[in-house]
Image (cartoon, rainbow, N blue to C red):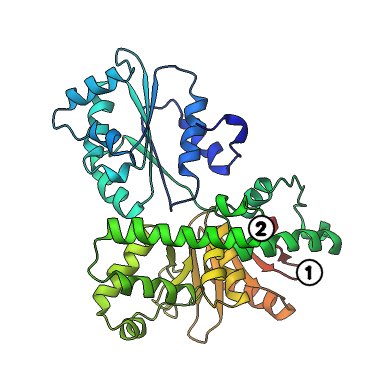
């Protein structure tokens, strides 16, 4: 087991900490290789009580404990492993999607004994369906994503103090942070990739993450008849990041029906490979289009496995940071004028590698029209224009 010293801090730790001793189960979900197991070990160490148990459900022997029809027999097995149920008990289970009946087991022990559960699973597609009703009022779900840029800096050992105001960013500070941000775009934020020393090791790890996702989520859990079509769709979507999904065109290109394509897209989103954004609407603007925009879970996969251009990769990297800030949407008029991201219906973000005054004027005008409280232009290149911020400040 890892020691506390080698577990690097993640922002999600602080969000979960207030619920460590609550009655509700803590469920951590997200794509593979984002650090869920490490997070589970971290909180296992934080629980001072000796009355705790950690089980990895990828081990088929551990899965057997939870496959009994009589839940009291499950209790007896856990007691043989050293757990006591006459006092507060803490059970940590990794990869719960591998045990179909686990939600009802968790509910039984929460209702009948003083048990606190910490659970991880890699597939939201399955977890949300399984846990929505069966654990109503008995759970808190947290989603773990690849590293944000600030976490990326921490993992690489940089303790840089990033100025909060754009006017404090000198060209020298910008050059230093941008060189690191370019690496973040090129190789993404999967912890295992960030910690590799060479570009070749990073590329191989990204290829392994893609392969692992395909084999364990698509092939084993997805149970689709034509896995090769889903693979082709994944590659096509990588090259379309930041674009609106033309479902008719995609279905024709893949030679499948629109309903099948919709099922595939829902699966990829439910297992965290992609994220689709709906258009922003307050129910009063008829110009908003209905098509969703698509983004990838991580820029590293797109940069290494597709031909996505620099602008699209930069926009996807900003998406990776903003998705932790709140609910995202985009806005576009019929004329084509758009806002890349709107966070929680209050703040507008336009992403430009090299912004101009007209970009700032445009988002200012649109934000005012939509009644948004704030707007920002996120730039890659250094700029002295007022209203410009940089991705490492988000």
**Can you identify the residue that label 2 sits on?**
198
Residue 382 got which mark? 1
Crowding at mark 1 (Cα within 10 Å: few <14, some 14-19, many 20+): many
The answer to which of 240 and 25 lies nearer the viewer is 240
List x then y, in percent, for residue 30: 43, 50
Answer with left or right where residue 65 lies relative to residue 143.
Answer: left
The single residue placed furthest to the left in the displayed view is 69
Residue 119 got which mark? none
- Closer mark to the observer between disc 1 and disc 2: 2
Q: Which residue occupies 61% across, 39% down?
A: 8
List x then y, in percent, for residue 361: 69, 77
The answer to whether any part of residue 371 appears in the image is no
List x then y, in percent, for residue 209: 47, 58
Determine the image quadrant of residue 25. Answer: top left
Determine the image quadrant of residue 53. Answer: top left
What is the count of numbered marks? 2
List x then y, in percent, for residue 70: 14, 28
Q: Which residue occupies 62% across, 50% down?
A: 195
Q: CA distance from mark 1 to mark 2?
A: 28 Å
Q: Are marks 1 and 2 in contact (CB under 8 Å)?
A: no
Q: Which residue occupies 50% across, 39% down?
A: 38
- Where disc 1 sits, the SS reads loop
Answer with left or right where residue 216 lies relative to residue 200.
Answer: left
- Where disc 2 sits, the SS reads loop
Answer with left or right where residue 386 lies relative to residue 303.
Answer: right
């Amino acid at each position: 087991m890892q020691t506390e010293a080698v577990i690097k801090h993640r922002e999600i730790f602080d969000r979960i900490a207030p619920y460590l001793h609550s009655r509700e189960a803590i469920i951590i979900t997200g794509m593979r290789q984002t650090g869920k197991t490490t997070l589970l070990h971290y909180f296992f160490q934080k629980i001072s009580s000796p009355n705790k148990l950690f089980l990895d459900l990828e081990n088929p022997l551990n899965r057997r404990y939870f496959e009994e029809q009589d839940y009291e027999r499950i209790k007896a097995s856990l007691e043989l492993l050293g757990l006591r149920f006459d006092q507060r008990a803490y059970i940590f289970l990794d990869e719960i999607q591998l045990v179909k009946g686990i939600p009802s087991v968790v509910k039984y022990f929460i209702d009948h004994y003083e048990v606190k559960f910490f659970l991880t699973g890699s597939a939201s597609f399955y977890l949300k369906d399984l846990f929505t009703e069966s654990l109503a009022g008995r759970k808190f779900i947290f989603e773990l994503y690849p590293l944000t840029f600030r976490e990326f800096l921490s993992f690489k050992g940089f303790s840089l103090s990033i100025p909060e105001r754009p006017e404090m960013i000198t060209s020298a500070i910008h050059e230093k942070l941008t060189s690191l941000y370019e690496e973040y775009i090129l190789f993404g934020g999967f912890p295992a990739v960030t910690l590799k020393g060479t570009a070749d090791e990073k590329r191989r790890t990204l290829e392994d993450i893609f392969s692992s996702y395909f084999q364990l989520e698509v092939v084993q859990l997805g149970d689709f008849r034509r896995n090769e079509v889903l693979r082709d769709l994944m590659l096509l979507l990588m090259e379309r990041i930041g674009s609106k999904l033309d479902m008719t065109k995609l279905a024709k290109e893949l030679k499948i029906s629109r309903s099948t394509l919709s099922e595939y897209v829902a699966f990829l989103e439910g297992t965290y490979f992609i994220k689709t954004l709906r258009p922003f609407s307050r129910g009063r603007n008829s110009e908003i289009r209905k098509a969703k925009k698509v983004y990838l879970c991580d820029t590293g996969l797109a940069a290494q496995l597709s031909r996505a251009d620099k602008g699209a990769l930069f926009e996807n990297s900003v998406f990776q940071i903003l998705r932790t800030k709140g609910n995202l949407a985009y806005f576009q008029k019929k004329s084509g004028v758009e806002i890349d991201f709107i966070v929680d219906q209050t703040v507008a973000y336009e992403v430009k590698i090299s912004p101009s005054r007209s970009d700032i004027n445009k988002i200012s005008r649109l934000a005012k029209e939509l009644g948004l409280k704030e707007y920002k232009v996120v730039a890659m290149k250094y700029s002295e224009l007022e209203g410009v911020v940089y991705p490492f400040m988000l």
